[in-house]
Image: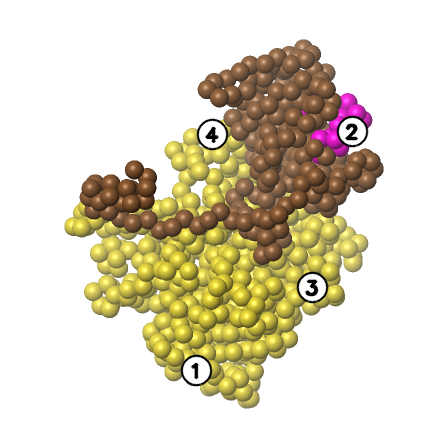
Chain colours: A brown, B yellow
Amino acid sequence: MTKILVPVKLVLDYNLKARVKSDKTGIDLTNVKLSINPFDEISVEEAVRLKEAGKATEIVVVSIGPAKAQDALRSGLAIGADRGILIETTEVVEPLNVAKILAKVVETEKPDLVFLGKQAIDDDSNQTGQSLAALLDWPQATFASTLVLEDGAVQVTREVDGGHQTLKLALPAVVTVDLRLNEPRYPTLPNIMKSKKKPIATQKIAEFGIDITPRLKVIEVHEPPTRKAGIKVKTAAELVDNLKKAGVL
Amino acid sequence: MEFDVVIVGGGLASLSAAIRLKQVSKMDGREISVLVVEKGSEIGAHILSGAVIDPIGLDALIANWRDDPESPLATKVEEDAFLFLTKKSGYRLPNALMPKLMDNHGNYIGSLGNVARFLAKKAEELEVEIFPGFAATEILYDEQGRVAGVATGDLGIGKDGSHHGGYTRGVELRAKYTLFGEGARGSLTKQLLAKFNLAANSDVQKFGIGIKELWQVKSKNFRNGLAQHSFGWPLDSQTGGGSFLYHFDDNLVSVGFVVHLNYSNPTLSPFGEFQRFKTHPRIRGVFEGAKRISYGARALTEGGWQSVPKLTFPGGALIGCAAGFVNVPRIKGSHNAILSGIQAADAVAAELAKKNPAPEFTAYDEGWRASPIGRDLKPVRNVKPLWSRYGTPFGIMMGALDMWTNVLVGKSFFGTLLHGKPDYACLKPLADVTPITYPKPDGVLTFDRLSSVFLSNTNHAEDQRCHLTLKDASIPISSNLPLFGEPARLYCPAAVYEVTYKDENIKSDPQFVINAQNCVHCKTCDIKDPAQNINWVPPEGGGGPNYPNM
């Protein structure tokens, strides 16, 4: 039977406008709503569907972050994951270091599959899944849009330029999921209530013995330039004139 | 699911009631299960207020909250300023003349949303079950007609009524007692008022709409702890309302404008008045080089002492702004919301301790008028009626005089004045008024509604039934449009309502359009529609604005 590990990340809620800190060192996260990364939510949903179909036995969600990252784990548990692991740190952990820590978690948890969101919507790195597969030397399929679990293998259809590619991977394997894979359910109130009683084990990041010093230095974060107001033109000729003036034509 | 107490709405009154219930439960060593449901995506997401906060409520609820490292209130009011504005100029009223009832000394400036988040944390530590993202849409009654809890709305029903992918049935939350803390003009509260005839012996409820922006200003324009209020321009003498402008935290300025919803000119736009207010020469300087961070709006109750309905009914009670405890001249109500939550909780806990709890815990209704809430509201009860009758500034002067007499001789010469007509009945026909026109926004200091709503982070799940329901779909075009120019287009601060034409030039074939996804849940349409034809019901839980620190 199959055990699935699903790493989840707590990010600025997708409904909110990111606001740059006044010193331009990053995004202001004080007093704003943080939620589970939407791609990770899809990963959890897929794992839970497999469990409901009797194809998976246990789903473990894991998150790396501050104590508040528990909220992302609770979201996963409310969808239907069985237990959580919180690896606590207040530092920024870059994707490669996340992958190194996850590789250690894989060593102890021994899952058959790791489902990750293809990327987190805060930094859009899209690196963790790939790095993890490389570190574990496991097969990987990225951007999964359909997934079929078979005996000892997983068949993944992934979106590529101009079409779909279907891969078959021997387990254990790493799969990163895309938007089209499923539509996550609304966690019901009774399930949220139950999720509060599901176990979350907390570990300090130092226990993993991995140097998480960032390799990148953020020089500046700034907002995209504001769009200039448009003008209304009366005739097609005037439009062409203006386009020429703007050097577009 | 069954609980001892279910609380609808996750605002200050509700969270305070929840905390107090658990405090009593710990003290007495008996279990009281408490559940709070909140339609916003998280606690605080739908909370919007000035806010200058009188700590009397927090003091009564949480000992030493000031020393809490996570205390949400860091800025004390350092200076009170009252301005009377004319079109070109402004006069600061001498503070010595201001009635003591309006003094802000000892009060705090902050974000009420953050106070709610702080209280939610305290409540969760006490094992209150808090469920944001779930809207209570239905009141449950038992066979005796007693309120027996609420049901949350179904999720995943499309515009056409069909179920889509994530369809999830709502759940019944049954309770021995249910407290309704929905805020001003709550949708379930409205049903309760009618069903139990709670307002039979009280005056009509009055409302205002408050629109607020949060700005980060240049340090040189920042005056920590300044609480400034104005009345007068841009409102005419017959329209009640005014502005607030509070400096707090890290170069933040909270600026807002309240328009009393008994205004009579249907071409008035509260949003337009607010934008225009910011351009006043005495005001605009603060915003030079500043950045607007957030926007939102919410209706508030203004009826006060004489409009508070009966608070209890079999199986439950109204708390906070659902009952209407705002003190209009003090421009604050959150302290009374907290106190009402505490009082209701105490009454509930006392009832639960009995062998045979009565269906109605009347002690709460019987007690509030003699409590600090009553003592806060009674002396100012005539301010709003005087303002409505005699306009600005004469009515305000009479109101101030009345407050002084209340302070000096302990009573009012007017007795208790009534409010007159309900707000929806105050509009004059289009033909009888001078239309108001508003200047175009400059995109720097003044803005249009859509770019403002954008800053409220408002979102609703796309395919769902419209939550702004019309009792009669023809009224907007057949009656509201010819009579009043369909005022929903103007009083809505979120550009939800539009009237579109096939040919704009000849105004042919008008259509009433409802952009429900913009709705910031302020409830103004439910209050002000002259035909009382708009019924605001909760959309899917989790929808609506996502206010950060409003």
Nearest to N terminus: mark 3 or mark 4: 3
Left or right relative to B330: residue B27: right
The answer for how far apart the CA atoms under marks 3 and 4 are is 44 Å
Question: What kind of residue is marked 2?
Answer: Lys
Q: Which residue is mark 4?
A: B164
Q: Secondary structure at mark 3?
A: helix
The chain ID associated with circle 2 is: A
Proximity of marks 1 and 4: CB atoms separated by less than 8 Å: no
Proximity of marks 1 and 2: CB atoms separated by less than 8 Å: no
* Disc 4 residue crowd, few under 14, some 14–19, many 20+, Cα 10 Å: few
Q: Which residues are magenta?
A: A98-115
What residue appears at the point 35 percent right and 51 percent down from the top-left corner?
A229
Q: Which residue is mark 1?
A: B91
Left or right relative to B421: residue B17: right
* Disc 1 residue crowd, few under 14, some 14–19, many 20+, Cα 10 Å: few
The residue mark sitting in front, 1 or 4, is 1
Tell me whether marks 1 and 4 sit on the same chain: yes
Q: Residue A227: percent from the left, percent from the top?
A: 41, 48
Question: What kind of residue is marked 3?
Answer: Leu
Tell me whether marks 1 and 2 sit on the same chain: no
The answer for how far apart the CA atoms under marks 1 and 2 are is 69 Å
The residue mark sitting in front, 1 or 2, is 2
Q: Residue A205: percent from the left, percent from the top?
A: 78, 39
Q: Secondary structure at mark 4?
A: strand
Question: What kind of residue is marked 1?
Answer: Tyr
Q: Which residue is mark 2?
A: A104
Nearest to N terminus: mark 1 or mark 4: 1
Q: Compared to A236, does B372 lie above or below? A: below
Which label belongs to residue B61?
3
The answer for how far apart the CA atoms under marks 1 and 3 are is 39 Å
The answer for how far apart the CA atoms under marks 3 and 2 are is 46 Å
The chain ID associated with circle 3 is: B
